[in-house]
Image (cartoon, rainbow, N blue to C red):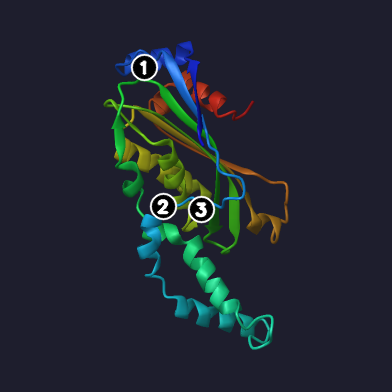
């Protein structure tokens, strides 16, 4: 279950709320949670199941078989006979976001007259570096300042992260796509997305820096304009302090 708590707003959020037509009295803070032992895929909506069938599994299997031959392996040996099929099914799931749409998750909103900041912190995500086809994984922190008297379910913010993460990606673009989706579908007064991730393409090859963590941020609306408001949302996300 996602935990939600009300926190008194600081002067920065009050100023931002007043400038944009709100009072900025409280902040609504959510921390992402999930049942123990439940994977990201198990938490996804069943609505993506039909779209997953569009993946050409046979073509992926053939490609994996060719890769095994190219590196000098025998795809007919006991340990590898089922590998192409397993990889094809894994790729179907890892890139499931290509057949999903953020609008499907963010279009279901609820009437709620509020000018409170909503923050969901610590959303686990995994994605695939499009340059080396190696995973990167970490946590996303998502915040938005509702506008128009509508809010979205907290789980939909986590699902939106997955929509864009489960594609061949760059972390820089991933942060921007999530922020753009919030802006497009929720029309918030402000949005902020911060992602922190470890890239296996840096850990396992090339620079071989296993302790490196990459942080990216995308801001929209009031958080572009008001430095104090941006500092406040980053504090609630526990970034940089």
Q: Is residue 55 above or below residue 194?
A: below
Q: Quick one: label 1 or label 2, which is nearer the N terminus? A: 1
Residue under pointer 2: 45
Q: Quick one: label 1 or label 3, which is nearer the N terminus? A: 1
Q: Is residue 119 above or below residue 57?
A: above
Q: Quadrant of residue 224?
A: top left
Residue under pointer 3: 170
Q: Looking at the image, do the residues carrying marks 1 and 2 touch, with CB atoms under 8 Å apart?
A: no
Q: Quadrant of residue 13?
A: top left
- Of circles 1 and 3, the one toward us is 1
Name the residue at 32% across, 16% down: 22
Which quadrant of the figure contains the C terminus? Answer: top right
Q: Residues within 10 Å of mark 1 (few under 14, many from 20)?
A: many
Separation of marks 3 and 2 at Cα, in angstroms: 24 Å
Residue 103 image point, x, y percent: 31, 47
- Label 3: state its secondary structure: loop
- Of circles 1 and 2, the one toward us is 2
Q: Is residue 134 above or below residue 140?
A: below
Q: Does residue 6 appear to the left or right of 24 in the view shown?
A: right
- Label 2: state its secondary structure: loop
- Label 1: state its secondary structure: helix
Separation of marks 1 and 2 at Cα, in angstroms: 34 Å
Residue under pointer 1: 17
């Amino acid at each position: 279950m996602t935990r939600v708590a009300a926190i008194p707003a600081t002067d920065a959020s009050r100023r931002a709320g007043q400038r944009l037509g709100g009072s900025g009295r409280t902040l609504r803070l959510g921390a992402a949670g999930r049942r123990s032992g439940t994977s990201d895929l198990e938490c996804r909506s069943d609505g993506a199941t039909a779209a997953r069938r569009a993946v050409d599994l046979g073509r992926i299997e053939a490609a994996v078989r060719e890769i095994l031959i190219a590196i000098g392996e025998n795809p007919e040996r006991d340990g590898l006979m089922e590998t192409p099929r397993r990889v094809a099914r894994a790729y179907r799931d890892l890139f499931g976001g290509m057949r999903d749409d953020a609008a499907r998750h963010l279009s279901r909103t609820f009437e709620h007259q509020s000018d409170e900041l909503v923050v969901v912190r610590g959303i686990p995500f995994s994605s695939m570096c499009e340059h080396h086809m190696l995973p990167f994984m970490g946590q996303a922190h998502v915040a938005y300042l509702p506008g128009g008297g509508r809010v979205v379910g907290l789980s939909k913010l986590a699902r939106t992260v997955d929509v864009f993460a489960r594609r061949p990606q760059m972390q820089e673009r991933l942060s921007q796509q999530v922020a753009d989706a919030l802006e497009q579908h929720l029309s918030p007064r402000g949005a902020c997305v911060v992602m922190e991730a470890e890239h296996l393409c840096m850990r396992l090859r090339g620079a071989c820096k296993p302790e490196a963590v990459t942080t990216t941020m995308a801001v929209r609306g009031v958080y572009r304009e008001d430095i104090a408001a941006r500092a406040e949302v980053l504090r609630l996300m526990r970034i940089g302090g």
